[in-house]
Amino acid sequence: MAVMDVRNDNTGWLVLWLEPLGEDRWLRPGETFRVRSDYDGAELAFSITSWVNEEDRAAGIENVAVWIEAGDCYAQVTDDAGDIIECGHHRPEEIDRKWTEAQQKARERVSELEPRRNP
């Protein structure tokens, strides 16, 4: 079994992205989440990337992605108590609303383009 802990040592949010699925989990300051995979091969199970987004940083948000490199991409994420943490955990309401609106606008644009593509 492969295990990796991700701890938020920042004073704001840390968004843990589980890739390649694109799932987000939001850690409050001081929180630790554990990413666990059943993979037990010789290759590295995980890799990490982080990035700076000036808009996020201004809002007190940092980002880190844990990439599932080997084994099943459906890794389990748990908190300190061992409880399973699902996608969207602690996602702030204003972020959820912003993403939902953007998704709806994208659907509308696709719907508008469909008649043009299929005359």
Image (cartoon, rainbow, N blue to C red):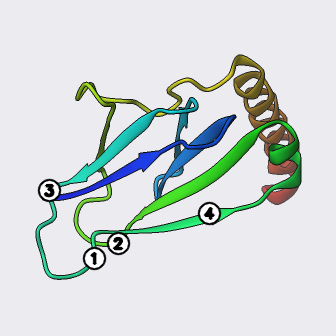
Q: Earlier in the sequence, mark 2 or mark 4?
A: 4
Q: Nearer the viewer, residue 33 or 66?
A: 33
The location of residue 11, given as percent across then percent down, is 68, 35
Q: Nearer the viewer, residue 88 or 60?
A: 60
Q: Earlier in the sequence, mark 3 or mark 2?
A: 3
The amino acid type, in three-letter code, at marker 1 is: Leu
The amino acid type, in three-letter code, at marker 3 is: Asp
Give the CA separation, mark 3 to mark 2: 12 Å
Where is mark 2, residue-wise? 69
Where is mark 3, residue-wise? 38
Give the crowd class for mark 2: few <14, some 14-19, many >=20 residues within 10 Å: some
User: Of circles 2 and 1, which is in front?
Assistant: 1
Where is mark 4, residue-wise? 50
Name the residue at 16% across, 64% down.
Answer: 39
Name the residue at 59% across, 43% down.
Answer: 15
Q: Quadrant of the N terminus?
A: bottom left
Name the residue at 53% across, 46% down.
Answer: 16
Give the CA separation, mark 3 to mark 4: 24 Å
- In the image, taking residue 66 as reference, residue 37 lies left or right, namely left
Q: Earlier in the sequence, mark 4 or mark 1?
A: 1
**Up/down of 10 relative to 4, above or below:** above
Give the CA separation, mark 4 to mark 1: 18 Å
Residue 44, numbered circle: 1
Give the secondary structure at mark 1.
Answer: loop
